[in-house]
Image (tube, grey):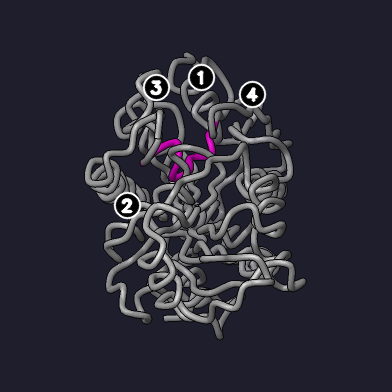
């Protein structure tokens, strides 16, 4: 089923009980979405798109507040430990904050599966195996070959230790049976500068961050990392298609509430966000960022979070990733 038809069907089904409900039945007070990254990044962009549309549906302002730090963990920790007394308080959950970082960093004390109320998956974006445009690699097999010929000398950059870029490279190392060097940066921006300049060899960068550089010709996209091809790059093969069966390294985004949020309220917000995601202008903008497969029920998102936590935990343990990696 195509994404738009799925979202439309989901929105019709899930939002039906609330189709004529008034915003007056929502809790009083400010509506706030907390984002653990600075303005302008993918998580922030998705929060603002959804927030704007919810504001229109509910007839009241939806404030997006940025609290960057520790690849989102600072905001996630604050949200988990704050006792909210009024309003509607939401957090943009991310694969880093709710599936990877808590399994690597000892300083993280919140429980990503117990300290929040799952509401809805906003979408998942692939990563792209990229290199500088000066390199002529045409397939992932060629990347594997250069790694085998130069064990421990080929470098993969990431936006930081414990990021999806880092873990995707570790998944690649294990699946291909090669050794490479991990070079962490403080974000995709500085990593891309060195990749384009030839200081590092490759990266599994996010599609959101890599698209502009790939389409401008400054970086070369080799392969993408979800099981199916993203609409934004229909001609680029997946890792699965090129022999890495089941390889799936996605950045995903979702909305969660405080641990004590009632199921009724979670379902109400879920229904309204499903309505937002089904809007043609929202779907078009999300497609442009490579964000797909959002929507669905509260229970579907809760099960998804458990599966992702287990999957990335297996990678962390198998690759022996630590905060010093």
Distance, label 4 to label 2, CA atoms, is 31 Å
Q: Position of residue 267 (x, y in %)?
A: 41, 45
Q: Position of residue 301 (x, y in %)?
A: 36, 50
Front: mark 4 or 1: 1
Q: Secondary structure under badge 2? A: helix
Magenta span has 305?
no
Q: Which residue is mark 1?
A: 78
Q: Which residue is mark 2?
A: 304
Q: Secondary structure under badge 3? A: loop
* Labels 2 and 3 touching (C-beta < 8 A): no
- Magenta residues (range): 90-99
- Indicate the quadrant containing the N terminus: top left, top right, bottom left or bottom right: bottom left
Q: What is the crowding at mark 2: few (fewer than 14 residues within 10 Å), some, or many (at least 20)?
A: some
Q: Which residue is mark 4?
A: 29
Q: State whether residue 213 is above or below residue 271.
A: below
Q: Which residue is mark 3?
A: 108
Quadrant of residue 143 within the rendered picture: bottom left
Q: What is the crowding at mark 4: few (fewer than 14 residues within 10 Å), some, or many (at least 20)?
A: few
Front: mark 4 or 2: 2
Front: mark 1 or 3: 3
- Sequence order check: which comes first, mark 4 or mark 2? 4
Position of 321 compared to 14: left or right?
left
- Sequence order check: which comes first, mark 1 or mark 3? 1
* Labels 1 and 3 touching (C-beta < 8 A): no
Magenta span has 92?
yes
Front: mark 2 or 3: 3
Distance, label 3 to label 4, CA atoms, is 30 Å
């Amino acid at each position: 089923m195509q994404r738009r038809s799925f979202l439309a069907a989901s929105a019709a089904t899930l939002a039906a009980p609330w189709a004529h409900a008034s915003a007056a039945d929502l809790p009083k007070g400010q509506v706030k979405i907390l984002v653990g990254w600075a303005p302008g990044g993918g998580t922030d962009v998705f929060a603002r798109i959804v927030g704007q549309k919810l504001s229109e549906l509910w007839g009241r302002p939806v404030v997006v507040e940025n609290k960057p730090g520790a690849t989102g963990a600072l905001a996630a920790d604050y949200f988990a430990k704050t006792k909210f007394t009024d309003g509607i308080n939401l957090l943009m959950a991310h694969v880093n904050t709710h599936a990877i970082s808590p399994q690597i960093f000892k300083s993280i004390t919140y429980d990503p599966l117990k300290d929040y109320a799952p509401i809805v998956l906003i979408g998942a974006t692939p990563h792209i195996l990229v290199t500088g445009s000066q390199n002529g690699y045409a397939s992932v097999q060629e990347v594997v070959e250069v790694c085998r010929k130069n064990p421990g000398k080929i470098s993969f950059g990431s936006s930081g230790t414990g990021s999806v870029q880092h873990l995707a490279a570790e998944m690649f190392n294990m699946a291909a049976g090669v050794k490479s060097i991990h070079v962490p940066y403080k974000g995709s921006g500085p990593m891309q500068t060195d990749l384009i300049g030839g200081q590092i060899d490759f990266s599994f960068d996010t599609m959101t961050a890599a698209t502009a550089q790939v389409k401008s010709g400054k970086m070369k996209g080799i392969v993408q990392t979800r099981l199916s091809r993203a609409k934004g790059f229909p001609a680029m093969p997946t890792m699965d298609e090129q022999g890495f069966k089941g390889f799936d390294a996605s950045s995903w985004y979702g909305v969660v509430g405080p641990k004590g949020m009632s199921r009724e309220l979670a379902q109400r917000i879920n229904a309204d966000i499903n309505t937002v995601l089904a809007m043609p202008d929202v779907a078009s903008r999300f497609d442009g960022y490579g964000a797909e497969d959002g929507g669905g029920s509260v229970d579907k998102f809760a099960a998804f979070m458990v599966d992702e936590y287990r999957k990335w935990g297996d990678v962390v343990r198998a690759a022996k990733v630590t905060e010093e990696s």
